Image: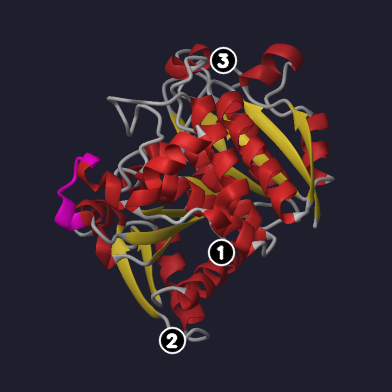
Amino acid sequence: MKLNIAVLAGDGIGPEITKQSIKVLKAVADRFDHEFNFEEGLVGAAAIDLLGAPLPDSSLDLCKKSDALLFGAIGDPKYDNNPDSKVRPEQGLLQLRKGLGLFANIRPVKTYDKLIEQSPLKSDRITGADLVIYRELTGGIYFGEKQTSEDGKSASDLCSYSTNEIERVAHLAFKSAQQRRKKLTLVDKANVLETSRLWRKTVTEIAKEYEDVELDFLFVDNAAMQMILNPKQFDVILTENMFGDIISDEASVIGGSIGLLASASVGGKCAMFEPIHGSYPQATGKGIANPVASILSAAMLLDHFELTEEADAVRKAVELSIKLNVCTQDINPDNHYTTEKVGDFLEGLISEIDNININNENLNLGQMTII
Ligand code: IPM
Ligand code: MG
């Protein structure tokens, strides 16, 4: 398969982790005989500094003519600490989502046996947790009208949703539930918010088309608590933009490190694949950032084009690297590897993946021969 992949690596650790994903995707292309072409563009603080805009037209155009977008991270403390700044790096990401019509953000969360003990949550609560969050991405309070009064003493952000915006993401979430454990939980605040009541009504109506899927509802405050108390109860979570932003960061704790969580944003012609973590500016250039979330996002890219065997090879390589402890310091504090080394290891594994059995005898062998 031939794919043109736009790369917007962005700020902070974005460039160093994205570089590892490109390496892994190139190894996949070689191993499975595909042609992946990569073209880079600017976004975020990097783009503001050079071109004065967080998403220059040239970058949006690049994405529009590409099959997929590999995105790094966005954000820079010099803007976070200045509430008066008119341009902010994050605007680039929001413009990208809107400009490419990416209305659904998919965030899978699972646990790795090796990392269970590292989670701050008790192991019996999280062992076997496996859920996916479908977050609406181009509506709600993120995109509603924003105002600050002239005297600067009040401000407002409008939250609005149309049935159409709810329906299109809901269908994707129901279809995903049909392929999984057939349970969908709508997270909302229908006891208070009018928009949430519209979500409940619309989703209840759509559920009639998916009779094999069990639908239930949770208020977001309760959902936040349940996510920690008993994450195993969740299969597919469907929610609006802001609630999805918050509970997906919370859910990342279950996996042991936010450095492992991948995401896909779909809906338009060019889908986007990005780690859920931010730009982690304190770590920039130190070789300590975990590239796995970005690499697993690249696996979601492969899934998106139905390259399932290829995506499985990437996931299998990641699992092996975690078993072998070939990991960055967030999950392997005592004997860690650099961002680059983890990328090299995974790149090497992809080409060898058929010859490697994941059992304890081969683990050391794998480490000696490949590193
Ligand atoms: C995310 C991020 C973004 C969001 C920020 C960087 C604008 O937190 O993708 O979850 O709030 O959507
Ligand atoms: Mg977020």
Q: Earlier in the sequence, mark 1 or mark 2?
A: 1
Q: How is the image coloured?
A: secondary structure
Magenta-drawn segment: 118-125
C-alpha span from label 2 to label 3: 50 Å
Asked where in the image residue 52 lies, by quadrant, the reply is top right
In the image, the residue with mark 2 has its CB under 8 Å from the nearest atom of ligand 1: no
Query: In the displayed structure, does residue 141 sit left or right of residue 63?
Result: left
Front: mark 3 or 1: 1
Q: Which residue appears at 33% of the width and 51% of the height?
A: 360
Q: Which residue is mark 3?
A: 85
Question: In the visual, does 186 lie left or right of 149?
Answer: left
Which residue was labeled with disc 2?
A: 212
> What label does residue 4 carry, if any?
none
Q: CA distance from mark 3 to mark 1?
A: 33 Å
For disc 1, the marked residue is 169
Indicate the amino acid at tag 3: Ser
Query: From the viewer's perspective, is the residue at label 1 or at label 2 nearer?
Result: 2
Answer yes or no: disc 1 within 8 Å of ligand 1: no
Q: Earlier in the sequence, mark 3 or mark 1?
A: 3
